[in-house]
Image (tube, rainbow, N blue to C red):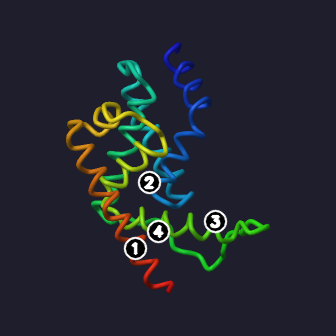
Amino acid sequence: MADRAIYQEFVQARSDRLLRTAYLLTRDWALAEDLLQESLAKVWFAWPGVEDPEAYVRRVLVTTYTSWWRRKWRRELPSDDLPDTPVDGGAERAGDRESLWRAVGRLPARQRAVIVLRFYEDLPVAEVARTLGCGTGTVKSQTAKALAKLRVDESILEEVSR
């Protein structure tokens, strides 16, 4: 019973941050909620043996997302409803941000996971490697490849807008 209480406290304390991570991986709030829910359900069964809960849940998030991506699983359909845009010149910054996330969305799942964990979660290379179950060299090379693709995307966007 004590394990259940600790698990519940962890979920209540960390869900918002984990949901943001899931959103950055999926780029869809509904899908992110599904990803987090499925990941937390998986963690529940392993909970008594988990030593570093946040790192473990992050790893489950990424592996679950990757398996969804590989299956090309899509539950939600796009909508014609657009979100509200910020005022006072924020539309330009929002457009830049949206362009960036569209570019990140075009990255392969592994590279997107590395970018999210390294630059959004601000995790060190060793922690990202542990979360993804790979070596630090793989994290570094995937980061370099992802950043190179993002730079190419940026230069193409600049040429098109001229």
**Foreground label between 2 and 1:** 1
User: In x, y percent, where is residue 158?
Assistant: 46, 78
Which mark sits nearer the N-terminus, 2 or 1?
2
Q: CA distance from mark 1 to mark 3?
A: 17 Å
User: Which residue is rendered at x = 36% and y = 45% of the image?
Assistant: 62
Q: Are marks 1 and 3 in contact (CB under 8 Å)?
A: no
Q: Gap between marks 3 and 4, in whole Å?
A: 14 Å
> How far, Cα to Cα, is label 2 from label 1?
23 Å
Residue highlighted by disc 2:
25
The residue pinned by badge 3 equals 93
Disc nearest the viewer among 1 and 3:
1
Marks 4 and 1 sit apart, C-alpha to C-alpha, by: 14 Å
Secondary element under disc 3, as helix, strand or loop, is helix
Q: Secondary structure at mark 1?
A: helix
Q: Which residue is mark 1?
A: 155
| Residue at (55% x, 58% y) in the render | 30
Residue at 44%, 25% in the rendered image: 53
Q: Residue 48 occupies which quadrant of the picture? A: top left
Q: Earlier in the sequence, mark 1 or mark 3?
A: 3
Relative depth, front residue between 89 and 28 = 89
Q: Residue furthest right?
A: 88
Q: Earlier in the sequence, mark 4 or mark 1?
A: 4
